[in-house]
Amino acid sequence: MLRFIFYLHLLVSVTSAGGSAPYTPTDSILLDCGASSNTESEDGRDWLADERSKFAPSNSESASFASRASRQDHSVTQVPYMTARVFRNNFTYSFPVSPGLKFLRFYFYPVQYSGFDGTTSFFSVTANNHLLLKNFSASLNLPVVDDQPAASLIKEFMVPCFETEKLNVTFLPSPYSWAFVNGIELVSMPKNMYVNHQENSLTFVGHKVSFDIPHATAFETVSRLNVGGATVGSVDDTGMFRTWFDDTPYIFGAAVGYTPSRGNNVTIKYSEDTPSYIAPAIIYTTSRTMIDDPQINMNFNLTWNFSIDTGFTYLLRLHFCETQLEVTEEGQRVFDIFINNQTAELNADVIHWSGGNSIPVCRDYVLFVPSEGQSKQTLWLALHPSKDVGSKFADSILNGLEIFRLNKSDGSLAVPNPQPESDPSPTLPSVGRKKKKYSLVMVITIAVFSGLLALSLFLCFLIYKRKVRRVKDSAASVQKSSWGQVPCPSNSTCTTSVSLLPSDLCRRFSIIELKEATLNFDDQFIIGSGGFGNVYRGCIDGGTTTVAIKRLDSSSRQGFREFQTELELLSKLRHVNLVSLIGFCDDHGEMILVYEYMHRGTLRDHLYKTKNPPLPWKRRLEICIGAARGLQYLHAGVKHPIIHRDIKSTNILLDENWVAKVSDFGLSRLGPMFQSHVTTVVKGSIGYVDPEYYRRQQLTEKSDVYSFGVVLFEVLCARQSMIPGLPKDQVNLARWARVCHARGTLENIVDPNLMGEISPLCLEKFGALAESCVRDVGTERPMMSDVVWGLEFALQVQEATERDMDMGAGGDEAMVIRSSQTSPLVLKAEGAGGGTTTDDDNEELFSVSGGKASESRSTISSVGRSVSRGDGDRIKSESVFSEFMNHNGR
Ligand SMILES: *[C@@H]1O[C@H](CO)[C@@H](O)[C@H](O)[C@H]1NC(C)=O
Ligand SMILES: *[C@@H]1O[C@H](CO)[C@@H](O)[C@H](O)[C@H]1NC(C)=O
Ligand SMILES: *[C@@H]1O[C@H](CO)[C@@H](O)[C@H](O)[C@H]1NC(C)=O
Ligand SMILES: *[C@@H]1O[C@H](CO)[C@@H](O)[C@H](O)[C@H]1NC(C)=O
Ligand SMILES: *[C@@H]1O[C@H](CO)[C@@H](O)[C@H](O)[C@H]1NC(C)=O
Ligand SMILES: *[C@@H]1O[C@H](CO)[C@@H](O)[C@H](O)[C@H]1NC(C)=O
Ligand SMILES: *[C@@H]1O[C@H](CO)[C@@H](O)[C@H](O)[C@H]1NC(C)=O
Ligand SMILES: *[C@@H]1O[C@H](CO)[C@@H](O)[C@H](O)[C@H]1NC(C)=O
C-alpha cells in the first residue's frame, strides 16, 4: 500500500535555481539534534548543534541524551539523521519567532541508537497549544516508496505564532517509552501565504457553507506535488524549503494523461495575485493534461487519490498555469473540478482566472471529511472537461497541488498510528488468511448483533415502562393502539427497536449524512442548545436543503422520552402551520431529529430583546392566525386531540415567508377521549402555564388556549410573559393585561412601535379575544377554532381601516378615529391565509451563511404606505429554536 506522507530525505537538486530565492525567511532555524558541533549538510544548509543550545532548557542534559544511529541507510544523509536527541522526560525547545504562520519540520530516522531503540519509541509532540503528534511512532509511519518502507521521514507542519514571541516545541514520551528526534527546522513564510484573512472566505466543497480559517489554526502538510514533473527539492523552493514531489504515485488508474513539455523555454509571469514565492517556476512550467482526443477525454477523469485521516478539515491548493502556446484565450480549455466526488468548481478556466498564458494562478478549496468509523479514507481529486461549454480543447490541466490537514476545534492534529501489518508472514497461504479475516468478521458481526439486541431490549423496556406509567395515570392507554405505535406487545416478541421508529413516514438519516451536514457537529453550526443537547443548522442533499438538526444528548433521560414523543407525533402530522419533521437518525444510539429549517427564527426574536426591526401589526396578526391554525389542527384536526403543553413565543417559528409554525412537541400529550382531562405532572414554561392546570393537575386543550393567550399579549405588548423585577401586579403579563383590559387601559401597555398603526377597533377585538384566552377557568376560554376566527376578524377590521384611510386623505393620525366607525363586517378573508403570500413577501432578501449574521435590507409596504428599512438589521441564526437556550424555562 502506498502511503503518501513525506518520505524523502533531502533531495539534492541538479537543476539548481541559481541566484537568490524570491523569499528570504525572517526566521530560519535548523537544529541538528544530538550533534555537538555546527555542521553543513550536503545541500549546503547550516545546521546548529543542539548540545547546550540556547533553544533547549537548562536541564537538557539530565532530561535527555545525545545518541548516534548504529547504521546508515544509503538513502539517509549524515546530517541530521545520524545523530538524535533522546528524551527521557518532557522536554521543551523554545524558539524565538516573529509573528505569523511558521513551517515546523521534524526529521526522524527510526533505527537502533546507542542506548536507545528508535523503532519502538512512542511519543507526543506539542507546539504551543497544538498537539501535533500523539503517541506517535516514527517507524509505524514510514511511508512506502516502491513497495519498500522508506528509512526516514519528515513531518511538516505549519503552526500559528501570532500572539507569542516563543514557539515552544515539547516532546512528551509515552509511558514506558522515550522520545527522540533527529532534526527540527523552523522557517517563516510570507504573510497571507496560505491563509489570507482579508480575502473572501472559502466555501466548503459540496456545501454552501462559507468558512474562514481561524487565526489559531495549525496545519499538517499531507501532500505537495509538482504535477507532471519530477520532484523538486527543498533548496529549489522559493525560500521556504518545501519539497514538491512527483505526482505519479498518486495518479489513479491508467489515465495518466500527458505532460506537455516546452522545456525551460517558458517564462512564468508572476503576478500580484500569485507572487513569485507562491511556488517555484518549475511547478508552473510542468503540468499534466489529458490526451489529444476529445472523444476519449470526455469519457475519463484525470484523477489523483490520497489516503487521508477522517474527522478533519482539509485545505487543498491547486496550482494552474497555461504554458502551451495554443492556449491563450478564455474558453479554450474549460473543465470541472471534483473533490471527493463533489463538485468543487464548474467551468474552471485558467486563462480567465489568471489573465493570460504563462501567468500562474492558484485556487484554494476546503473540504470536511467526517469520521465514519474508519480513521483512514481516500481523498479523490478529479478533473473533467466541461460538458456544456463548447471549449476548443476538451481537456483539463493541473500544475501543482498542496493538501493540508487543519487542526480540530480543540487544536489537535493527532491521528492514530497506521496499523502495523497484521500479518507479517507473506508465506502464509491465502486461504488461511481469508479464513482468519472471515472469522474476524464473524466475531465483529456477533458482537454488533448482540449489542443491537441488548440495545433493543433496553429500548423496549423503557418504552414498556413509559406505557405502563401512562396506563396508570390516565385513560390514554386506550388510544395507544389506534396510533399503531405498539412496539412491544409483549417482551417475548419484541426483537428490534427499529419497528417503533416510523421510517416509513419520514426519512431515516445515517449518522454520516448528518455529520457531513454539520461538519461533524461543529460548534459553529449550533443554533440552539439546552439540557437535551444542541440544535444545529446543516445542509443535506449536497448542500441543497438547509435543515435544523436536534441532537439529543445521550445522557438525557427526559430527552429520550421527548425524542420518542416528538417522533411519534410529528411524523404523523402534516400541516402548513406545524414545523415538519424531515427525518430522524438513531444510528449508534444517537437520537437526532431533522426538521425543516426556519429562516426567520422564533416569533420572540421579532418581538423584543432583539435587533430585528419591529414587526408591523398586520404581520403580527397573520403570524398569530397561522400559529392558531396549527394549534387548532392539533386540537381538532386529527383523529385524537393532541395537547401541545408548551406553547410560547419561542415555540412559534417563522419561515422565510413569515409563515408561523408551531414547534417542539416534546411535551405533547394525547388529549382526553373518554374523560374530560388528563391528569399529569405539570410541565410547561413559567409564565405560560395554565393556572387551572397548575392547581388541579388536569390537562385539557384549554391549557394550550391559555398559553396561546399569553402569546397574544406578548405580540401586542412586546414584553416577556414574566418579568420578575416589576411591581407585583405587573410581573405576570397575562394577569397584568387582564387588569388593564378591565380598567380599559390596555392601550397603555401596547408596544410603542405599534402606535398609530393599530386601529382602535382592532385593538379592542384583539384585546378581548386575548383576555378571554387567559381567563382563570378553562371552560370560560374559547376553543382554538374560535380563536382563529376571532383573529381573522381582527385582521379584517385592521385591513378595512387601512383601506378606508387610503381612500381618505391618508394622514397618519386620521386613521385612528375614522376607522372605528366604519368597520365593515363582510370582507373577503383573502389576506388571512396563514400569512403565506402577501404582496411584500419577496421584498426581503435574506441569507444566512457560515453561521454568521447577515444584513438584510427590507422594504415593508403596507397599503398605501411604504417604509424602507435598510438599517442593516442583523438577524442572528442562533435565534432559531432559541427556546432551547433557556431550558430553565420549563
Ligand atoms: C509531561 O507532560 C504531560 C502532559 O503535559 C504530563 O501529563 C506529564 O505529567 C508530564 N510528565 C512529567 C514527568 O513531567
Ligand atoms: C501507543 O500506541 C501503541 C501502538 O499503537 C499502543 O500499543 C499503546 O497502548 C499506545 N499508548 C498510549 C498511551 O496510547
Ligand atoms: C514557552 O516557554 C517559556 C519558558 O518555559 C515560557 O516562559 C513561555 O510562556 C512559553 N510560551 C508559550 C507560548 O507557551
Ligand atoms: C523559445 O521561445 C521563443 C519565443 O518565446 C521562440 O522564438 C523559440 O523558438 C523557442 N525555443 C525553443 C527551443 O523552443
Ligand atoms: C488509489 O487507488 C488505487 C486503486 O484503487 C489504490 O490501489 C491505491 O491504494 C489508492 N491510493 C490511495 C493513496 O488511496
Ligand atoms: C468524474 O468524476 C465525477 C465526480 O466523481 C463523476 O461524477 C463523473 O461521473 C466522473 N466522470 C467519468 C467520465 O468518470
Ligand atoms: C468516489 O468515486 C470513486 C470511484 O470514482 C469511488 O471508488 C469512491 O468510493 C467514491 N467516494 C465517495 C466518498 O463516494
Ligand atoms: C485550531 O485550533 C484552535 C485552538 O487551538 C482553534 O481556535 C481553531 O478554531 C482550530 N481550527 C479549526 C479549523 O478548527
Image: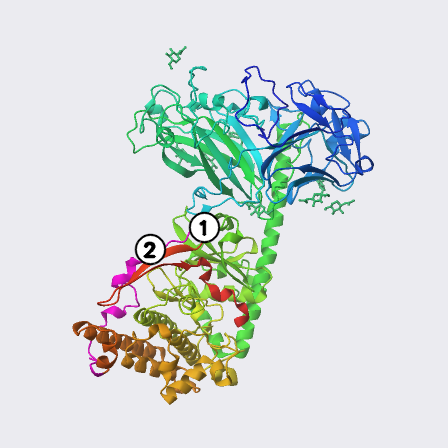
Task: Name the magenta segment's main secondary structure.
Answer: loop
Residue at x-position 23% and y-position 77%: 814
Per the image, label 2 sits on a secondary structure element best described as loop
| Residue 782 can be seen, yes or no | no
Residue at x-position 26% and y-position 75%: 798
Q: Position of residue 124 (x, y in %)?
A: 69, 40
Q: Which residue is mark 1?
A: 850
The CA distance from mark 1 to mark 2 is 17 Å
Q: Which residue is mark 2?
A: 845
Question: Which quadrant would residue 845 be assigned to in this image?
Answer: bottom left
Q: Position of residue 793 (x, y in %)?
A: 27, 77
Per the image, label 1 sits on a secondary structure element best described as loop
Residue at x-position 42% and y-position 27%: 360
Q: Nearer the viewer, residue 496 or 606?
A: 606
Give the residues in magenta: 821-850
Q: Is residue 427 magenta?
A: no
Q: Decide which of tag 1 and tag 2 comes sooner along the chain.
A: 2
Name the amino acid, label 2.
Leu
The answer to whether 321 is drawn above or below residue 590 in the figure is above
Q: Position of residue 582 (x, y in %)?
A: 41, 57
Name the amino acid, label 1.
Gly
Which mark, residue 355?
none
Question: Which quadrant would residue 151 be assigned to in this image?
Answer: top right
